[in-house]
Each structure stands twice: as structure tokens, then as C-alpha cells.
Amino acid sequence: MLIKTSFTLNGEVVQVETAPDAMLLWTLREELKLTGTKYGCGIALCGACTVHLDKVPVRACITPVSVVSGRSVTTIEGLSKEGLHPLQQAWIDEQVPQCGYCQSGQIMQAAALLENNKKPTREEIIGHMNGVLCRCGTYNRVFKAIEKASQEG
Amino acid sequence: MSNDSNSNRLSRRHFLAVAGGLTIVIAGAAVVPGLSRSKEDNTNGERITAWVNIQPDGKITIYNPAAEMGQGSMTALAIIIAEELDADWNDVAIEHSPIEPDVYGLSWRGGLGGPMITVGSRTVMGYYEHLRMAGAQARYVLMANASKKWGVPIEELTTGPSKVLHQSSGKSISYGEISRFATAPDKLPDIDQDQLKSAEEFRLIGKVTDRHDIPSKVDGTAEYAMDINVPDMLHAVISRSPVHGSKPDLQNESDLRTMEGIVDIVILDHGVGILAQKIEQALKAKRFMQIKWSEDGMASGHDSQAAYEIYDATSRSDDTNWHSIVSEGSVEDNLSADDVIEARFKNDYVYHAQMEPLNALVSPPREGDPAEVWVGSQAQAGARQAAAEALNLPEDQVILHPCYLGGGFGRRSMADYVTEAALLAKHADKPVKLLWTREDDLQYGAFRPICSQTLQAKVKADGTISAWSHRIVGTGGGLLGSGARIPYYTMDAKRVEMHSIEHGVRTKHWRSVAHGPNKFAIEAFIDEIARKLGFDPYLYRRRLMINDQRSLAVLDAAAAMCDWNSPAPEGRARGIAFAERSGALAAGVAEISVDRNTGMIKVHHFWAAVDAGVVVQPHNAIAQIEGGIVFGISSVLRESITFKDGKVQQSNFHDYPIARMADTPDQLEVKIIPSDEKPAGIGEASTPLVGGAIANAFLALTGNSLRHMPFTSERVLEVLS
């Protein structure tokens, strides 16, 4: 049995047909071909699948598609309407990524912070970002890039 | 990717037809100094090598033979070629090279033509000299063509960024223009070493700051194998044996087959595969799967805690069959004395935990078209071979598309996941994308092995070490020994030996291999000796390094960076450590505090100095050294895989924690020491420093020794009580 779900994805209304228990992560990746959102752990422990649901960062791997019905989802592909988001530019300036696999999640998590808090403190940045894992150990540069974007923003 | 990479075996004809412009092609093996005569004969001019293609519009494509897993070597290798080619860096594009180990393989015992494998921090050091030569030869070809066109002697020509210049007439022509009429010689000129640029002339080596792959890694467009989709593709997962070597007996196959989207169930030697239309259908069926496992697994009964007791008994036994790593002078007489200092160190299994779980997409051959494989692999040729064997095809009927790796750290130089995907694709006769869940990736991991290390030293009152014994007992065979040599420390006599005991569990190279455990034990033991004798740990190392000025300079640099003689802030202490890995020399200092209630260690500051010879991309090298420190902190403070009854006890990041942003030092300072020596490996240089530096800071702070990695809260509290 398939159910239809409509929601706004990166500013445009989309409709998907999925199993009732389908998760947003796989629906984004496999049905909608938006592969910037990554699978890392499947149980909301690593943050690689972070997207925005009505501007709030959520883990797409445990977010049922049914939950996003009628709401607005933003992925890394839709973070910036034009050109690079200030965080993406800061990420390049600071040469943050190594393997890069977690970085969509890092950037989406960081973008949600700056949306509500233009000048976060050191503790606020760490507290907000601590749930997104990076095995390559780029955290110091993630931190620097967020600080840079917040100072310029 | 261009069409070029769609063929893993290029003929000259094919390459020229597809690429257009001027490809610096070399028939036979002329550009590969290390190729044997017999291979040259076999190739009979059919195989070619090409590192550079120049298009009339000026675009310069440089081919990258290495895996890109975040270490940055795809950029570094292109810089090396572009430097001697005298290219304008803005003109350079980078693409994967064909998978042709004979010509693109790593330098291995002299010339190129070794394996196409990205391991051991070997990429830049393994290609450096050869790619400088390749760049210089390509430049020479361009100059020779300009010389012919203008009718002037080649000696009168020079080059500027992407152009050939004739100073006396003021003529200038771009490389792109030359490519319109240029011909490549059958045999490239021999270029003398002294015709290469001097370090002062470098425009790119040591100068280019940005990595090629980074823009695609901030907007979600970088392609990992996980992101590839092809038409008619099935999704697959596998339930693998919980005890390595046990065999599956599926109990509910008919029920599984009725589940929505399930296309097939495949019984493998080591597990049961599920093929489904959608990934979530496969994952759901995996959760419902009921398997009885045979009890004859080779890892049956393995208990990692109990293994330490066996190791300790083995290291005391007279009957142990030791494998010698170092034997210099006689230690026996000295080690029987009463005042011998002794300590024993241990380290748990650790898991790679690369953020992208293993996966591969294999498409079987169709209507005369070859099979195709999309994979992130550290061993591209090995992965292609594994797929070819599983598909029962000759290797030239398998095209491998290298993808970015979401982390490697040694795990992706195995091809087990490629073999699995190929077996399933062959069975289904359809393209199959195999996903390892995080739980699969962890529980069927291949771990850095456990070991117990017993160190003994006979030390004179002045600090001279008259005898040093280091005995390593663990599992994993050759994975135990790296880093146990300490040629930079002068001692009267040294004995380093190891002994491996097989437990039937999967073990593997893990970033810096045994350097992590061995440098930890060595460096912690040096501090224990210094403390016993009342010496400053830094000055004591200086004394031991008396005959190695290059190492000493690195140690001094780290001490200067942290102002070693200044007191640490209240409640903190510093510890110093030294390590060499893949030719790089590194010294590090950790400044830590300890919460005596929780047992949590916090690393506030880490300083590292590294001498890695000529550094092609210093900005990226610093990033690698920073990341290696955090990777080290993660393993030293948090990570532990344990076995009980042959089964891994952990399953995901809740019970296998890795370092988070809060665990990162507030300050990470890295100094690259300028050097004209040949390049050394950087990606693993800093990781082995961390265990010793933290243990030594802890010893300075508390007077207690931490001798078992990881230094978890529980172990810290135990040591403090």
C-alpha cells in the first residue's frame, strides 16, 4: 500500500508516493534523487542526514515522510536560493571538509543556528553542533567557519 | 567525469579520439622508469600512459591515480605535475586516471607501476619524483613543438604560466594554441634532475591553498558511491555472521519472500543477502530475518578481556616463539638486575567508523557491454579484480568508476564489500546497490587489533639506557609491529619482539596501524623512566636523541610552540610525545585537565610540529595533522570494541562513541618545519602522538600512569582511586 504525501521541498511543492512508514532520508535520496543528505547511522546518532523541517534541524533518518505532510523541508541542495550561503562560502574559505561525507549535515545544522542566533557564543556553537559527528576531525574548522559566517553575516 | 574514465584500459587510438587536443601520450613504457623490459615487450606499444591532456581552449586535464578520501592527494598530485609543466593553475582540471596499475601504479621499489592503492600516507611521497618528471617531459614536448613552429632552437625558449616564450623575439604562444598543431614524440626526452625547478622557482608546490574537491563537498554535489543510481537497480543488504566464520541457516525464507518489494533471498557463505526494489524494503526484511548460525565459527569463544590474560602469560613464558623486530646489542644480562624498570600497556580493538558506511554498486555485463562498478575504494585495481572474480569475468570486462570515499582510514583497502555486491548482481543479473548499515559496518568490521606490550629498561643514574626491551603480544600478525622501532633514541642495547595469537576475528590496518599502540607505550614508558630519575620529560628525550639532529629539531620546535618551561594554567598539565610515521617526524604536546569526579579527561590545547620533507600543500597538510590529532583523541579517550563469545559487543555510535566537537581541543596548533628533504607521508603523522602525550600529561598532573587505551572515565577513576 502506498500513501501520497505533499510537502514543500526547497521552495517547491512536491508529492511522493511511499510506504506508510517510509523515512524522509530514503525518500529524499531514492525517490527525489537529492543525494546531498547522507545516511550515516540510521538512528539519529550522527547527524549526517540533517535537514530543516520548517526551519528546525531534524534527522531525516528517523523522520517519517507522513510527518512532513503540508510542511516545508529544506536540504543542502536548497539551502541557498542563489549562489552560496554565507556558511558554504565560509566552509570553502576555511577549507573545512576532508572526506566531506558529514558536511551537508554540519552545514544544515549550523545554518539553523545562525537563523535564530546571529552571534552565537563559543559555548552555543559547541552545544548546537555537538550532535553532528565528523570522523575526519574537522570540528575546529567547522567552528571557525561558523564564527566567520556569523561575524560577516 | 568525462568519457575518458569509462574505459579502464585505453588504447592510444581511443585516448586520442576521445580526448582531442594534445595528450602527452607515450607508447610503451618510456615514461615509467621502473617497468621491466619484459613488460615493455608485452605491451608492444598498445598500452600507453598519459598524465596530461591539453585542449585548444587552454584547458589542462591532469589525471589522478589515487583515491580521494579527504586527504587531498588528488589536488597535491596535480600540483606536482602542473608545477613542472609550468601550467597556470587556473587552467587545470583534475580527472580520475584509468585503472592501469602498470603505468599509474604507485612507486614501489623504485619506479612507478606498483599497486594502485592509497594507503600508508604513501601517495605524495610515492609519486613525487615521477610526476615532476612527467610534468617536465610534457613541458619539453610543448617547447619542442613551439621550437619547430618558430624555427628557433629550443634552448632559446622559456615558459611562463601555460605558455612558451621566446625572449629575444618577444614571441609567445599558449599551451592551448600549441595543442592545435603539436605532435607528441614516440619516446619522451630524458630530463636530468638538475633541469627540474629549484624550490625557489616553485609557483605551485607549497603555494596552492585550496583543494579541488572542496566546493562540491559544501553544496551536496560530491558523488560518493552511495549516491549513484542506475536504471533497473535493485537494493541489497546482507545479514552477516555475528561470530566470524559461522554459517547461516535461514529459518523464515518463505515468510521473507512474501514481504513487499522482496525480489530474492541469496544464501552466502557468511550471511544472507536480500534483494529488494527499495532500500527500506530490504532493511525491513533484514529486521525480520531469523537465522540460526553454525557454532563452528573461527572466532567462536573469543573474549577480548580474557585475551589480555593470555597475552600477559605469553610475554612471561620462556617458550614463546618471538618474532624479532629489532636486536641491537645484548639486553639479557642487564635485564636480570633488580632495578629494571618495567611497565605493561594495553589497547582495545578500535573500529574505522568512516562516516560513509561501506557500499558498492555493481552492474553485470549486458548485451556485450562490460560490467560496471561504482565504489569508493582505497584499492581501485584490487576492487576491480574482486568484482571480476565474483562475476567470473576477465578484468578488462569490468569498468570501475572511482567515487569519492566518505572516509577510508584503511578499511576501504579491503574489497569484501565489492565482492558481495558483485555476487548479488551476478545472482540477480541486474544492477545491485549493496548497503552496509552502520550496524553491519561496525559489527562486521575489521579492527585494529588488541595487544599487550611489556617494556623493560635498565637505566643508569645519568639516564643512559643500557638495555631496552619491548615485547608485543597480541593478535593480527603483522599489524602489531609498525612503529616499534625507535632509531632516533640512542640506547646501548635494544630488543623489540612480537608474538601474534590468532583468534579468528577480522583485523585490519587502521590509520597509522600499530604506531598508535606502540608509540603510546614507548612514549609513556619514557616518561615513567624520566619521572623515576627526576628528569624533565622533554630534556630527557633531548638527551636520548643526541644522535638524531633532525628529530631533535622537531622535538625542540614542539617544546618551543608550547613554551614548555612556562607553567601550565592551574589544574592542567602538559605531556610531550614523539613519533615517526611514513617518514614524517612529529612531536606533540597535550595540555589536559581531569575531572576527578567524573573521570573525564579534557584536552585543552594540542601543539604539533611535523617535519615531512617538502610539503606540496602546506594548508592541507595542516588540516590533515589537525584531523589526525582529533582522530587520535577519539581513539585514545573513547573508542573500544570488545568481544564476548566471539561476538562484537557494540553496534552503533551510542555504544561506540567517537570524538565530538566538545572533545576537540580549544586550540590546535600545527607547525610544518621547512625542509628540502624528499616528501614524507602526512595523513597519519600526528595520530600516533596522542596516546603518549595525553598519558604523559596525566602522569604529570596526577602522578598516576594510564596504561590501557582508551582512557575511559572508568579507567581514569580506577587509576585515581
Image (cartoon, rainbow, N blue to C red):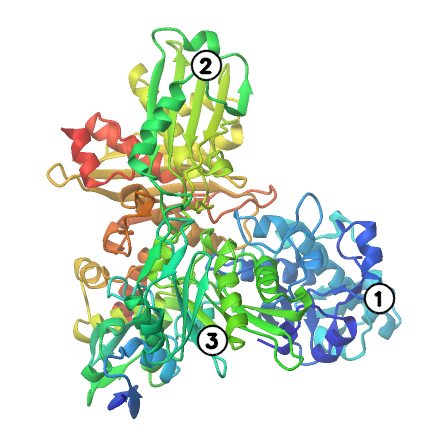
Q: Residue at x 43, y 28 (%)?
A: B472
Q: Circle 1 marks a residue in which chain?
A: B
| Disc 1 from disc 3: Cα separation | 40 Å
Q: Is residue A133 left or right of residue B212?
A: left
* Residue B313: quarter of image: top left
Query: Label 3, on which residue?
Result: B228
Q: Helix, strand or loop at disc 1?
A: loop
Q: Quadrant of the C terminus of chain A?
A: bottom left
- Disc 2 marks a residue whose amino acid type is Ala
Would you identify the image quadrant in which residue B465 lies? Answer: top left
Instruction: Return the chain for callout 2.
Output: B
Q: Which residue is mark 2?
A: B467
Callout 3: chain = B
Amino acid beneath label 1: Pro
In the current view of this chain or complex, which residue is farthest to the left?
Answer: B597
Nearer mark to the viewer, of 2 and 3: 3
Query: On the image, numbered disc 1 is attached to which residue?
Result: B185
Mark 2 and mark 3 residues within 8 Å of each other at the beta carbon: no
Name the residue nearer the viewer: B136 or B95.
B95
Q: Are marks 2 and 1 on the same chain?
A: yes
Q: Is residue B565 above or below residue B25?
A: above
How far, Cα to Cα, is label 2 from label 3? Answer: 57 Å
User: Which residue occupies the foreground of this view, B445 or A81?
Assistant: B445
Q: Residues within 10 Å of mark 1 (few under 14, many from 20)?
A: some
User: Is there CB contact under 8 Å for labels 2 and 1?
Assistant: no
Q: Quadrant of the N terminus of chain A?
A: bottom left
N-terminal label among 2 and 3 = 3
Do discs 1 and 3 belong to a common subunit?
yes
